[in-house]
Image (spheres, helix red, strand yellow):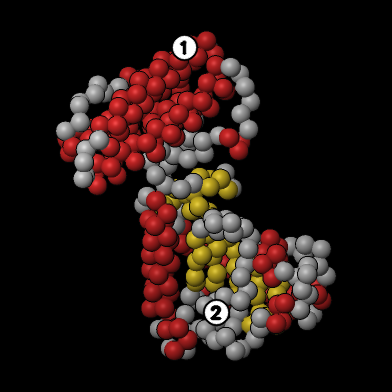
Amino acid sequence: MGYAAERGVENGRKVRIDATVTEADIHHPSDSSLLWDAVRVLTRLLAEAHESHGVHRYPKRTRRAKRRALDVLNAKGARKQRKAYRDLLAVTNETIGYARAAGSSLESQPGSLEARALAAELHHYVVLAEAVIDQTERRILHGEEVPASEKVALDLRGPYRHRCQGQAGDPLRAQGHSHRRPLRSHPGLGRGGREPGRFDAGDPHARASEEDPWPASTPGRFRRGLRLESEPDRGQALGITDVSFSKKRGLEVLDMVKSHWVYKRLRNFRAGIESWISFLKRSFGLQRCTWKGWAGFTRYVGASIVAANLLTLARHL
């Protein structure tokens, strides 16, 4: 934004905001697939413990677990499905026993930080595997309804996931400026206690100049970020001359902007961010993040945004 302001491309005095979801590169976390993931991950760590630290070689159960997971998927009737689940649970419990024994062996090795780190990783996935086993037994074998808050809602391969708009991934906020020029992103909305619809209107990086007044156009769910319920003039105190919400959320037009004409202009202006999001997903890979972990997600999104901005600036200049 600073470079665009220096070159006279953008002054950052008008902002439009929307939110979207970037999918994570994970499969749908069904009970059978999570059990298969647990066996696969623990077996990989056991092999690493044997090769790097001389731990006893334990039997591999990945082939059997994969077959039982496929039997669950293709079973015709609840009886055959439960039979496959019982065998898959037995295989997972057996692998967990191997992992516990290997973890104890690793912890007993004196002065090896790598062995202790691997033991901690084994313990981490053992805890997750036991939670999946408990969830599966309650749901499949005992017919119990497991509350959503108690379900294991993550994949054992590493990436964070967030259910939003029917997609598994992480939400981000896209912030653009006039005439399809530089766009910024704020990945990880909803993480660390922050709400998905939160908008920090006082963000000093939101525009090129902090002194100039600026209008903003956002979805209705971002109203809470401006705290208009408790502080009607908070927007003006932060330098926002007009703020237009696509859904009024109980506000009158003149409470948001100077006139109905300004409200319509800002509402139509905000619609342009949809094409920017589509552009990023079609041309810069923002539809699905293929990098693992939270750090990989932020790097992937940031690289897409930077590439799109460089191309847009080059075309304009």
Q: Which residue is pictured at 58% across the width and 35% down the height?
A: 150
Label located before the other in sequence (2 or 1): 1
Residue 62 drawn at (x, y percent): 30, 25
Q: Residues within 10 Å of mark 1 (few under 14, many from 20)?
A: some
As rendered, which of 122 and 271 lies closer to the eye? 122
For the C terminus, which image quadrant? Answer: bottom left
Q: Residues within 10 Å of mark 2 (few under 14, many from 20)?
A: few
Q: Is residue 43 visible?
A: no
Tell me the quarter of the picture where residue 109 sits: top left
Q: Which residue is pictured at 30% across the width and 38% down the height?
A: 119
Q: Is residue 31 above or below residue 52?
A: above
Tell me the quarter of the picture where residue 101 sits: top left
- Kindly identify the amino acid type of the residue bearing the numbered disc 2: Pro
Q: Is residue 235 above or below residue 167?
A: below
As rendered, which of 95 and 260 lies closer to the eye? 95
Residue 147 drawn at (x, y percent): 63, 33
As rendered, which of 40 and 174 lies closer to the eye? 40
Q: Is residue 189 visible?
A: yes
Q: Which residue is pictured at 38% across the width and 61% down the height?
A: 299
The residue labelled by disc 1 is 83
Q: Is residue 163 left or right of residue 33?
A: right
Tell me the quarter of the picture where residue 94 sits: top left
Residue 33 drawn at (x, y percent): 43, 29
Gap in Å between the C-alphas at discs 2 and 1? 59 Å
The residue labelled by disc 2 is 204
- Badge 1 element: helix
Residue 146 drawn at (x, y percent): 61, 29
For residue 275, which numbered disc appears in the image?
Answer: none
Q: Is residue 237 above or below residue 36?
A: below
Q: Which residue is pictured at 45% across the width and 15% down the height?
A: 86
- Kindly identify the amino acid type of the residue bearing the numbered disc 1: Lys
